Amino acid sequence: MPLRVTLLEAVRVAWMPSNGALHGPALDVLMRWNLIALCLCFLVAHVWLIAAILRRWKSKPATAPKALPWLILTALCAMYVWMAVTSQRLWANSRFAGPAPAAMQVEVVGEQFQWYFRYPGEDAAFGVTRPELVNAAEGNPLGLDGRDARGKDDVVSSVLVLPVGREVDLRLRSLDVIHGFFIPGMRLKENAVPGLVLHVHFTPSVIGTYPILCSQVCGSGHARMQAMLSVVSQAEFQAWLAARERTRIQEGAP
Amino acid sequence: MRLRVFTTSHRALGILYLLLALVAVIAGTLLSLIMRLHRIWPDLAVPFFGTIKPEGYLALVTMHGTLMIFFVLTTAPQIGFANLVLPEQIGARGMAFPRLNAAAFWLTALALLVLLAAFFVPQGAPISGWTSYPPLSAVASAGPGEGAGMDLWLASIAIFCLASWLGAVNMLVTILGERRAGMTWSRLPMTVWAWLVTSILTLLVFSVLLAAIILLFSDRHFGSSFFVPRGDLVNGHIVGHGDGSPLLWLHLFWFFGHPEVYIAVLPGMGLATSLFANFARRRVAGYRVMAAMLVAIGLLGLVVWGHHMFVSGMNPYAGTAFALTTMAIAVPSTVEALGWLTILWGGRLRLRTPMLFALGFLSFFIAGGLTGPILAQPALDAYLHNTFFVVAHFHLVMAMAGVFSIFAGIYYWFPLISGRMMNESLGKLHFWITLIAAYGTFFPMHFSGLAGEPRHYERLAGPVTSFSAIAANERGITFSALLLASAQLIFLWNIFTSVRRGRVAEANPWEATTLEWAPEMGRGRVERGPYEYEIPANETIFHPQWELASKQE
Ligand code: HEM
Ligand SMILES: [Cu+2]
Ligand SMILES: [Cu+2]
C-alpha cells in the first residue's frame, strides 16, 4: 500500500465513526478544531521545554521576556472562552430546546443486558407499564398493563428502526440499574436512569445501520449490551411498523 | 535507619506510608496488566485467575482503580511525603499530633487489608467501578461481587475516610500552628502550600464521601431507599420501595471525586515547583501568584463536580454552569504550567534524575491537562464521556503526572532518608523507558475513545460491533503497558541496592534551600524565602533558609 494511503487509513481509523445525524457535522467540526488547537499547544509547550533543556549550555543565563507568559496566558484564556461559547451553542440546540411537536416518539428501555424500543402505535400514546408485570419469557419485557387501552397498539422491538430525515424524541428509561445509551454514529449519549424519564432528540440524516452501545457499567453483561439502529427510508419504515402492528394484533396484546 | 513498627516518628511513618503505597501500586499494576492482556487475548488463561469472565474483568477494573486512587495517589504524595519532610520544611519539632498520625497510618493499612480481602469472599470483588454507582452497588443481586465484595469495599473506603481525616487534621494543625518563627506565608516551600490545600480539601470532601457510603450501606442492609427508586426491578425482584434517586449518589460521590483528583496531583505541583527552582537554580518568578493559584485550584475544584454528569440526567442548564466553572479551572492550571515553563527558560538546568521526573510530570500535566477543556464542553463530552478518551485523559493528567511526582520525590529525598544517593545511570534509564512507555500506553487510548470504544469493556467485539479498526492500536497499548511495568523493576532494583551500597551522600547533595536539608535543626528565626537561588555571571549562588539574612546584600 502506498504510504499516502496508509497514512490516510490511519487517520480515518483514529477518528470518529462516520456520522449519520443532522447535528453531527457541526459537532465533528468543533471536535476537529479543538483537537488540532490543543495538539498545537502540546507541541509548542514541548518545543519550549526541549529548547529550555538545550539552551542550558549557553553561558549567559537569560530570562524569558516578562510579558511573554502573560501574553500566552491571555491568548489561551481567549481560546478557552471561544471553545466554551461555540460548543455551548451546540449544547443549547440539542438540550435546551425541546423537539419539534411533529417529532416521532420512541421509548428506549434499558435492562440488564438488553435494550428495548417501544413505538406508541397509531394513538401516539404509550400504554402504562408496571414493573411487577415484567415477564420477558411471556413476551412482556416492559410490563405493559393489558388493562390500559393505549398500550394495545404499542410495538416493542429489539432493534431501533427510524425513518431518515424525521426528528425523533427518545424517552429513556431503565428498569434496574443505570445504563448509558450511546450511538457513536449519531453522536448521541445519555444515561438511562431508573426512576427518571429522560428525553433526548435528534434527526438521523443518513440511511444505514449504526451500533448502539451501553456506555455505563451496568453489570457482568455490560460489554454485550448492544443493539442496532437501522435508519431506513420513510416508506420502508412505514412498512416495517405496519408489519409489526399486524403481528402484535394477531398475537393478542397482554 | 531502623524502623520500629508502632512508631510515632513522623519520618518513619512517612516511610511506612510509602511502603504501603508500594504494595498497592504493585497489586494495582498487576491487575491492570491482566486487563490489558485480556483485552487483546480474551481467551488467554492467566495464572491464579484462569480465563477471565466478564465480571472478572470488571472486578479487576474496580480494584485497580480503587487501589490506585486511594491507596497510591491519595497516600504517597500527600500524607506519605508530608510525613517525610513537612515538619522539617516549616521548622517544626515534629507533627502536631504524633499518636493521631500513627493511628491514621494503621487505619489506612487496615483499609487496604479489608479492600484486598474482597478478592477472597464468595463471588469475589465488586464490579461497579471505583465510582460504585447505585442501584448496581446498592443491590446484592445486581451482579456478582455486589454482595460481600461490595460490603468490604464500602467498609474499606469508610475506614480510609477516617484515616484521611486524622492525617489531614494532623497536617493542617502542624502547618497552621507549628511553623518556626519567621516562617511566614511567603516563605513556605510550595509543597507546604499544596499540603495545606489538600488537607483542607480532604477534611471537606472525605466527610461527604463517608456520609454517602453510610447512606449506601443503609440502603443495602437497613431497608432505606436513598439511592433506589420506587419500583426498581433487579434480577426479577422489585427492590425499590422508597423513593430514592441514583442521581443523589452521583452528586455526593463527585463532590468528593473531583477534589480527590486534585488531592492526588496538587502535592506533585508543589514539588515540581521546588525541583524546577532547585535544578534550574532560579527563583520562582511570581511565587505569590503560583501559591495563590494552588489555592484557587483547590477552591474551584469544589464547584466543578457536575462535569462528570453532563449526560447522566442532570438538568442541561446545570451542565452549562458546570462547563463554565470547569473552563475557569483551566486558567489557574495554565498559570501554573506557564510559571514552570518560565522558571525553566534560560535556567542553568541540572538534569539529575529527580529533575527528569519533575520534567516528566510537567509533560504529562500538559498532555493530559489539555484534553480537559475538551471534556469540559458538554457537547463534546456527550460523545467522549465514558469512552477510552477519558481513560487516556485521566491516566495522563492524574495517574502518570502523579506517579512521576512520586518518583521525583523519592529520588530527591532518598539521600535525606537513607544517607545514600540512588544510582544516577539506573535512574536515567528508568526515567526514559518509563516516559516513552507511558506515552505509548496512554496516548493511543485517545484514538480508541474517538472510535467510540466505551470504558469497562472487557472485549472489543460485541454482538453488533467489532472495533477491528482499533485492534492494532489496542495491541500496541498492551505491549507498551508491559514495557512500562517491567521498567519499574529497574527502579526497585535501584532502591534495593542503593539503600545498602549507594554512594554516601554529602550534606545537602542537591544544594537545596529548604529547611529539611538544614545540617542541624536549630531554633533560629527563618529570614529567607524558600527559593533564593541566583546565577550571577558564570557561577551559581544560593541562600538556604537556615542562613541568616544578614549575609545577604
Ligand atoms: C501500568 C500502568 C497502568 C495501566 C496499564 C492501566 C490500565 C488501566 C486499564 C486497562 C483500565 C480499565 C479501562 C476500562 O476498561 O474501563 C484502567 C482504569 C483505571 N485506572 Fe489505570 N492503569 C495504569 C495505572 C494507573 C494509575 C497509576 C492510576 C492512578 C490513579 C490508575 C487509575 C485508574 C482508574 C481510576 C481507572 C478507572 C477504574 C474504574 O473505572 O473503576 N491507573 N487502567
Ligand atoms: Cu452497561
Ligand atoms: Cu472532575
Image: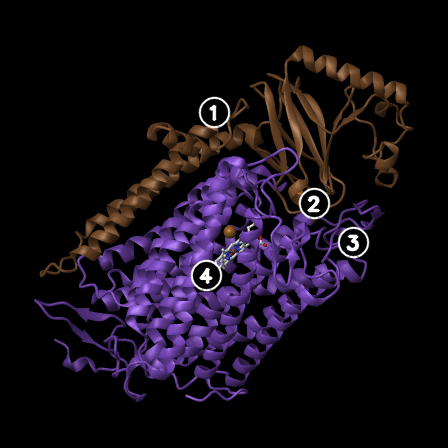
Chain colours: A brown, B purple
Which amino acid lies under the numbered mark 2 shown in the image of this protein?
A: Gly
Relative to B130, B430 lies left or right: left
Give neighbour class at mark 4: few <14, some 14-19, many 20+ (Cα, 10 Å): some
- Point out the image quarter for the N terminus of chain B: bottom left
Confirm whether residue A195 shows in the render. Answer: yes
Q: Are marks 2 and 1 in contact (CB under 8 Å)?
A: no
Horizontal side of A197 relative to B72 (left or right) equals: right
- Mark 2 or 1: in front is 2
Residue under label 3, please give it.
Answer: B141
Q: Mark 3 to mark 4: distance in Å?
A: 36 Å
Q: Within 8 Å: ligand 1 and the Cβ of disc 4?
A: yes
- Cα gap from disc 3 to disc 1, whole angstroms: 43 Å
Which of the chains bears the disc numbered 3?
B
Distance of mark 2 from mark 3, alpha carbons?
14 Å
Q: Residues within 10 Å of mark 2 (few under 14, many from 20)?
A: some
* Residue at the image position 58 percent from the left and 27 percent from the top: A97
| Amino acid type, callout 4 | Ala
Crowding near the residue tagged with mark 3, few <14, some 14–19, many ≥20 C-alpha atoms within 10 Å = some
**Residue B184, percent from left and from top:** 32, 74
- Write down the chain letter for disc 4: B
**Residue B485 tag number:** 4
Residue B431 in percent (x, y) is at 34, 62
Using residue B80 as the reference point, say whether residue B181 is left or right of it.
Answer: left
> Mark 2 near ligand 2 (CB under 8 Å)?
yes
Q: Give the label on residue A221, or none.
A: 2
